[in-house]
Amino acid sequence: MGGYGDMQMIDENGLRVDGRSPGDIREITIETGVIPVADGSCRMTWGTNEAIVAVYGPMEAHPRKIQRQDRAVLDVAYNMAPFSTTDRMRPGFNRRSREISKVTKDALESVVLLELYPRSKIRVTIEIVSAEAGTRCVGLTAASVALADAGIPMTDLVVSVASGKINDVVVCDLNKEEDNYGEADLPMGILPNSGELVFLQMDGNLSQEEFMEAWQYNMDAAQVVHEMMVEALKRGDSQ
Amino acid sequence: MNSGPVARLDNMSKKNGAAGPRKNNRGQTLVVPGEDLGDSEGFEAGHGVMAISGRLKAVKQGRLREKGRSISVEPTHTRYIPRPGDLVIGYIEGCTNNIWFIELGAPFNAILPMSLGPGKIDFGGTRSVMDIGEAVLCRIQEVEETHSSVVTMKGMGLRKIRSGVIEEIDPHLLGRLIGKGGETLRRLKAETDCRIVVADNGRMWVDGDLDGILDVRNRLSAISGDSNGGAN
């Protein structure tokens, strides 16, 4: 949210820098079963973002002090590969990856039926191979597909989409330029079947009307992405 | 930048109708978590299905099964859940002076007390009999309410595995491997000339010639490949 200054990111026809109209989302591909040794896995590309997620478990939780007597623990690790951005990312955990791991874990805990596996652990590893903008959304969405692929019981899938504001126009699914030079960003985690929210963050300022418009964009886009997720899961299952 | 089609909001297709997918294509319907399976009135929620606010909802990915009034999901991927009496192959993951901890491929490790171990063992001598990483063929003796399970090696054929290899498939594919009345497994044993012990946790001990073992391994990967679209 660096502020747009003089940068014009919407032309007179209402089209954005990559030719999309305000309500369009970037191209998405989803593939399951990409890591043979994992219990469940998913590769998701969203524009030029690419995330690979592996799920292991449920398994015995080690060390024992992390075990919960009434439910399983989710161990979510989000990481960006050093080569995922044009500036080399320093390898290893940092404040940002810790924050995203935590919010992803909190969102997934709302849907995974953890109480079925007390004292055990489910490990979710999210690796961002290529980053453009909105990697937390890609990571969370791909993680829910990988969990379903692993046969983990869940009440719903989680779809995460972000909308934001550029040049005073609310747009759906920001790309890198819009994310860097736009005025606001609103990523949301949505349960597509019930319309419930499991994750919401906001960066920048939106008026109440703009917020509701971004909200509606996210809700609508979630249905589109959800259909792709279902299709990917069923395709992986039936081949 | 993106040459492919852009997903547009107006491309949204219709959601499941009031009846849900249950009414469409009985028997072979694939479902994913959260999918609406219709009204729960008069139906029973079986494995992988939950009744929430009067509606049936799938909580696992798999194939929909309807048996009488019971609706269930036969999952595509499963994790072994121990049951008393199951024959299992486990790896020793740790030990104390009088207990071994056994990894069964389940969400929880089992314990093997010294008193149920092979033969007579002195206190503190657990590791000299069976060390970490070794495989054992054992039987589930007890599963407590807290999911802790106890395994035993007292029984016919239960032993430490010293030769051959251990192969693994998803536990729900065991039926396909064993066949009706054990026919498929019997044929596999005869054709490959291998000694095969299939455990309930999806692991199997294969002992014999190298060629036979490789043959068994190829057939197993064919079974696993068939079930998940050749991803593995």
Image (tube, rainbow, N blue to C red):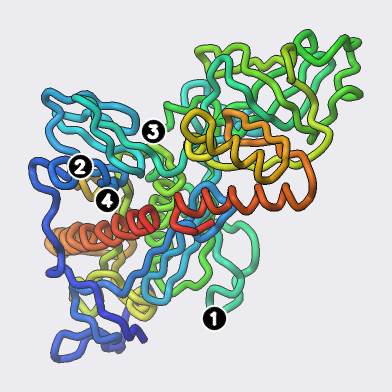
Position above or below: B140 against A102: above
* Residue corresponding to mark 2: B26
Name the amino acid type tagged 2.
Arg
Which chain is disc 1 placed on?
A: A
Which chain is disc 4 placed on?
A: A
In the foreground, A5 or A21:
A21
Q: Seen in the image, is B49 located left or right of residue A12?
A: right
Confirm whether residue A110 shows in the render.
Answer: no
Which chain is disc 2 placed on?
A: B
Q: CA distance from mark 4 to mark 2?
A: 30 Å
Q: Quadrant of residue B128?
A: top right
Among numbered discs 4 and 3, the one appearing first in the sequence: 3
* Residue corresponding to mark 3: A113
Q: Nearer the viewer, mark 2 or mark 3?
A: 2
Q: CA distance from mark 1 to mark 3?
A: 39 Å
Q: Quadrant of residue B46?
A: top left
* Residue corresponding to mark 4: A190
Looking at the rendered structure, the secondary structure element under dot 3 is loop
Query: How many C-alpha atoms fall within 10 Å of the one at disc 3: few (<14), some, or many (≥20)?
Result: some
Q: Position of residue A16 (x, y in %)?
A: 24, 84
Name the amino acid type tagged 1.
Thr
* Residue corresponding to mark 1: A86
Furthest residue to the bottom? A12
